Amino acid sequence: MKTRSSLLDPHLLKGALIPSLRKLDPRIQWANPVMFTVYLGAILCSMQLFRSINLFELQLVIWLWFTVLFANFAEALAESRGKAQADALRSMRVTTPARKLVGNHETSVSASDLRPGDLVVCEAGDAIPSDGEIIEGIASVDESAITGESAPVIRESGGDRSAVTGGTRVLSDRIVIKVTSEPGHSFLDRMISLVEGSERQKTPNEKALGVLLVSLTLIFLLVTFTLPAFAKFLIEQGLGGQTPGFSSLVALLVCLIPTTIGGLVSAIGISGIDRLTRQNVLATSGRAVEAAGDVDVLLLDKTGTITLGNRQASEFIAAPGVDAKILAEAAQLSSLADETPEGRSVVVLAKQLFDIRARELAEPHATFVPFTAETRMSGVDLLSGGETRRIRKGAADSVKRYVESIGGNMPTEVSRNVDDISAKGGTPLVVVDGSRVMGTIFLKDIVKGGIRERFVKLREMGIRTVMITGDNPRTAAAIAAEAGVDDFMAEATPEDKMRRIKAEQQAGHLVAMTGDGTNDAPALAQADVGVAMNTGTQAAREAGNMVDLDSDPTKLIDIIEIGKQLLMTRGSLTTFSLANDVAKYFAILPALFIGLGATSGSAAGPLAALNVMNLHSWQSAILSAVIFNALIIVALIPLALKGVAYRPMDAASLLRRNLLIYGIGGILAPFPCLKLIDLTISGLHLV
Amino acid sequence: MHPFIPSLAFIVIALGVSWPLSRWLFRAVVPPAGIGRFDKVLATLLGKSALTSGSWKRYFIQLVGFNAVMFAVTWAIMSNQQHLPLNPDGQGPVDTSLVFNTTVSFVTNTNLQHYSGESTYSYLTQLTLMFLQFTSAATGIAAFFALARGLAGKKDMGGFPRDLARIVVLFLIPLAAIFSAGYILSGIPMTLEGAASVTTLEGLTQTIARGPVSAFLAIKQLGTNGGGFFGPNSTHPLEGAGIISNFLSLLAIPIIPMACVWVFGRIVGRPKHALVIAAVMSAFIVLKIAVATTGETSPTAAFANLPVAESPNLEGKELRFGATTGPLWSVLTTSTSNGSVGAMHNSLNPLTLLAPFSGMWLNSTFGGVGVGFINFFLFMIIAIFIAGLMVGRTPEYLGKKIEAREMALAAAAFIIHPLLILGGTALFAATSMGADTVANAGPRGFSEILYEFSSAAANNGSGLEGLGDGTTAWNIATGIVMLLGRYLPIVIPLAIAGSLALKPQVAESSGTLRTDTATFGLVTFAVILFLGALTFLPVALLGPILEHLMVPI
């Protein structure tokens, strides 16, 4: 995926040539009414050539066809980038037989025969045949084919890292996988069809724009093809001159209808998704990309997005009368089975400070108590001499409730320490041995560099950021202040998250969020833009409408910018396209009615006064306009593929900026260009 | 003093008058208590259902049903006027195509007149037409209220009978009475007696047509109707007797359309947005006044190279008012779909014609009572769509997303106007139906045909008189154009508002395109100017501009 081809790779350019010819198929042209009009005009004008041929009309026809081809080329070029990626993905499809597990027997079946619920075995060196969930074992998996990340990742049964993707490869160990996808509908298949654009449907906004472009085309059709009637009247009134010829009228029509945006609109849509793909984000639909542009509330998980992935234990603060080393030991014991980075950092800190070695606790008398969202504590029960020693660590309020429920109490000193740590933006974990509170572990959160500036930008764009954290309100407030988010949700459960999303949506906001766990799935589905981390569970990946292969939650911000850029590119090129018409009118209208009202003896009538560009002749004027109209499509292909420059700012400034560039610029730019083309073709004696 | 300055001052005065008027209009339609005393009377007369409100569909069906009844009644009276009372001058039967045209013309608030009232229609017919001037104006205002309710997010867009009754009885009739009183005081006739016969100084007998002119004039001007009692409309001395009546007539033209803008701001709760809209509309008016006054202070084009003294173009104008009020009137009457004239438009200089033409082509810079705002709304939807995309969000108006359905409707409504004007003009210019009826050769003749269709499509009613528009072909063609140009641009925007009302409200942020800023006003101005120019530049070129360029200098 991470093949970053340059925008106008010669290889891709060449590859787009044949498809642009193939797109001359009327069924394909029909899908784009603006270009279909040009296509039809080109056909009719070509047929006219058979009756009488002259150099002017021949050139006109050639340029009309070029206009159609250039638009085809833009679309083909946008598609070709996706095609190259799709081909690479296709080569990853597993062709070796899969080892299906029936009872205890392994049978060799084709990967395409696997159905959801089937069990397959994969050992080191095997390709994983289909998407699935590990139900047994742990393995290192090479996912570079999908993510581009060469470092292998650990996948294991249970928990949030149990999902595996078809097409990836097991590097070590043995796992049993329960297949979760139908053949042909795996993640890989979905990726292929996404990057290839084969499932591309017009997005709501693209449809609305299409309607506007069609209506403009109809109006200009009306404007152009009523002209002969008007000319006839004036000629019969004795004004002289000629009724404009059919090909000249087609030329005027093609110049007036919004061919610039019409020719580039599908390239813009495809490249929007492509830009996401190049960021290693897969969107399930173009609709999702568009929705990203509208998002105005971001729910961001604190950990990994706002703060550096993991909190680190930095200090043991013992309760009065407790030795710090005893506390460290208890803390270490409670964390031995805690595989979270925080848990591990406690073990490491105890070793560093007091040289307490992590003891082997595989003995039968140790029972680990895992962390749950409900108890918000974890720990260990040690059975020694008929007595159970219960060591727990967890959030202060949970521990307090726990201690009080078994007859202990929370020393005020400890509560004060907890408050201090929270106030500093740290996370306090209280350790309790039996009913005795031992002290506090100081977990430090480190806010990512540069994140504050990004939030300021987001605020300028009118996007509110809400930090989601399981921390208590004080800790959350401290980090929120440090990171500069607009709002935070402390002690948030997945249900809280869901409620918050619904409340925001009720108030008319569009919400984006990232998530990875199975319990995030409902919220991911509810959010307008739900970005699932690739490391997440299968459930999460299916619930969201985007998957981030890099599993980088910060990317949500890039996704929003891409969405906005997509809409802006459409709007700006529409404006540019229409603004261009002014100059084209000045070129073509005087040319069409050149002889009208001419006094005897002169060829040019009074309307020649409108030939402000002083174009060489009426033929060169018309031809210049048509050539300009065709070339501008090519000239704007890079812009369509890259998207207009986007800097986060408020709507009013954005509008003024784009109006200045694409509106005023669009009015002025064609004048010198038309003159230049006119000088060239008249210099070459083409007209 | 340059004539531009008093015209500008006039616009400021009109805007000033429109503000208190908007409060009156709002309260007339939306009683503070929800159900007013008037509504109770209405309920006893028409039944309880007259007070219920419903969807935009129900509203439009009631609107069309009511208009159809008006059409039938008027047709019946007009085609039997010779048998009916109140016909002191013994007006005879009228040609069927003219009956069709006149009926459509008055039901649609156009008041295109292919006849001279004083010599064609009986007083009963004229009074029926006056009644229509109230109801057709009220129809437009009612549709505007329904649209505004929808855009304010109400699924329930009101009930047509109640709105109509309240607008006519509580607003238009009292307002017209005030203006009529002013007219009577300034010397305009108000009588049901037949034409007066007088002996002139030379001893000849002259018949002077008269009638209930004051009453007719007030609603004609206020309701953007424009159908004159007399053929020459307000250029007739008995319709414009002096400076006071002339001022009243001018003032009456734009004040209700202006008031509608303020009312809109009030209904949707965004007064600043209304201010921006009013500013955009006023900018267009000022621009057109500048064009018109410049054109008319230039010497008469028809006299070029003739041995006459150069003066402002005074042809076709009331000489007591000089070259000032004529162009101002021509701008106001076309900007608002009024269609009354205070100077003969066919005597305007070629470039001056661009002002009335663009007024009718845009038909939304204040525009007809109620409907002008509706037309402006269509332009605004397109402006918002393009501008909305440029800020990187799905375009939204007043918190409602504009998507394919709304765009399709807006686009359909948007095509109708150029289709009727350009299509009609092409048909008549290319055939003897139009070519044989023009009064002037060359580009001016083309302008005459173009003007007639523009006027019909915009429900304006004014004309480049001289055109022989009394033919069956003209009567039928403009009749059809008036019908389509009236009801489609009402029903489609109502459908859009109905569709928007059902959508969830989107919250606003600094990423939202605000509709109450100068930037938004500028964008809307540019979009209207641009779309208008791109659509109508070729015909402007072949009519007024070509004529101007052909004047030998």
Image (tube, coloured by chain):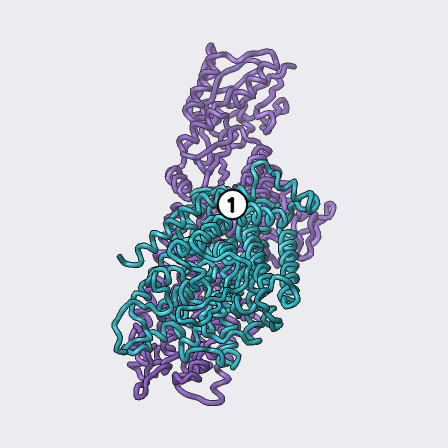
Question: In front here: A292 or A431?
Answer: A292
Q: Residue at x 32, y 68 (%)?
A: B313
Label 1: how many Cα within 10 Å (few below 14, some 14–19, many 20+): many
Residue A493, position in %: x, y? 57, 31
Q: Colour of chain B?
A: cyan
Judge from the rendering whether residue A606 lies leftward or rightward of residue A498; answer left or right: left
**Quarter-of-image position of residue B529:** bottom left
**Residue at the extreme front of the image, as rendered:** B203
Judging by the rendered image, the residue that carries numbered circle 1 is B25
- Residue B408 visible from this viewpoint: no
SS at mark 1 in the image: helix
Question: In front here: A234 or A198?
Answer: A234
Q: Colour of chain A?
A: purple
Residue A427, position in %: x, y? 47, 26
Residue B527, position in %: x, y? 42, 58
**Residue at the extreme bottom of the image, as rendered:** A52
- Residue B187 visible from this viewpoint: yes
Picture quarter with the N terminus of chain B: bottom left
Q: Is residue B105 above or below residue A685?
A: above
Judge from the rendering whether residue B52 lies leftward or rightward of residue B518; answer left or right: right
Residue B119, position in %: x, y? 53, 69
**Residue at the extreme right of the image, as rendered:** A103
Question: In front here: A116 or B323?
Answer: B323
Q: Which amino acid, by three-letter code, is at mark 1?
A: Leu
Q: Residue at x 48, y 32 (%)?
A: A488
For the image shown, how many numbered marks are present on the structure?
1
